[in-house]
Image (cartoon, helix red, strand yellow):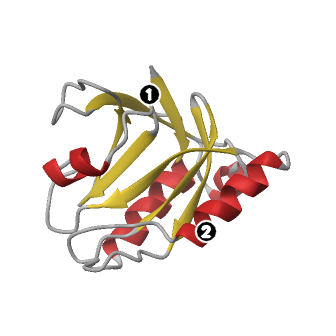
Amino acid sequence: MTMEITIADRNELLRLAAASVEEVCGLLLGQATRIARVVPCRNVAADPAVRFEIDPATLIAAHRAARAGGPGVIGHYHSHPSGVARPSPRDAVDAAPDGSLWIIVAGAAVTAWRAVANGAVEGRFDPVALAVCGCADERDSPEHGIHTVSR
């Protein structure tokens, strides 16, 4: 399976992660194979330097918006400020095997993972190919100087 993300959303994830020494996190909205929007959320973890917990109020609001016809919550993202863009043992403990998408950002890397039972990585995650697509929305339009599609 390949998951599509716009250049603008990929770049926003990189920008957010680079701007903080703590783990940043947020929601991924979209459909089965396309991320339509990234929504930054407050990290409410007790120790946000090494863990993340998405603000429950934001998560509830996103689910309500989806029930009202908006894009669905298909997963979330977080950063590893001093690690690699690969699920950690802690991520595996915290992840439910529900098929949700996890994006992990570290340095200049953005990687995608599916949380599953008996996954290939840490026993909980399978890698997902991430296709970076241009011109998928107004933020990526030719007027903004972006004309490429990377696959």
| Of 145 and 73, the residue lying toward us | 73
Q: Earlier in the sequence, mark 2 or mark 1?
A: 2
Tell me the quadrant of the picture where the N terminus can be found: top left
Q: Nearer the viewer, residue 58 or 102?
A: 58
Q: In the image, is residue 137 above or below residue 82?
A: above
Q: Report the Cα–Cα distance between label 2 and label 1.
A: 32 Å
Secondary structure, mark 2, is helix
Q: Estimate how packed mark 1 is, as few (under 14), some (14 to 19) or many (20 or more) residues with alpha carbons within 10 Å.
A: few
Q: Nearer the viewer, mark 2 or mark 1?
A: 2
Mark 2: amino acid: Thr
Q: Residue at x 34, y 29 (%)?
A: 116
Q: Residue 51 occupies which quadrant of the picture?
A: bottom left
**Numbered circle sitting on residue 151:** 1
- In this rendered view, identify the residue nearer to me: 96 or 130: 96
Kindly identify the residue that appears in the image at 17 percent across and 50 percent down. 88
Residue 40 percent across, percent down from the top left? 53, 68
As drawn, the residue found furthest toward the top would be 1
Amino acid at dot 1: Arg
State the image coordinates of residue 42 (x, y, percent, origin top left): 48, 76
Residue that appears at 14% across and 60% down: 83
> Disc 2 designates what residue?
58
In the picture, residue 136 is in which quadrant? top right
**Residue beneath the point at 77% across and 55% down:** 65
The residue tagged with tag 1: helix, strand or loop?
loop
Q: Residues within 10 Å of mark 2 (few under 14, many from 20)?
A: some
Q: Position of residue 62 (x, y in %)?
A: 68, 58
Q: Is residue 33 above or below residue 23?
A: above
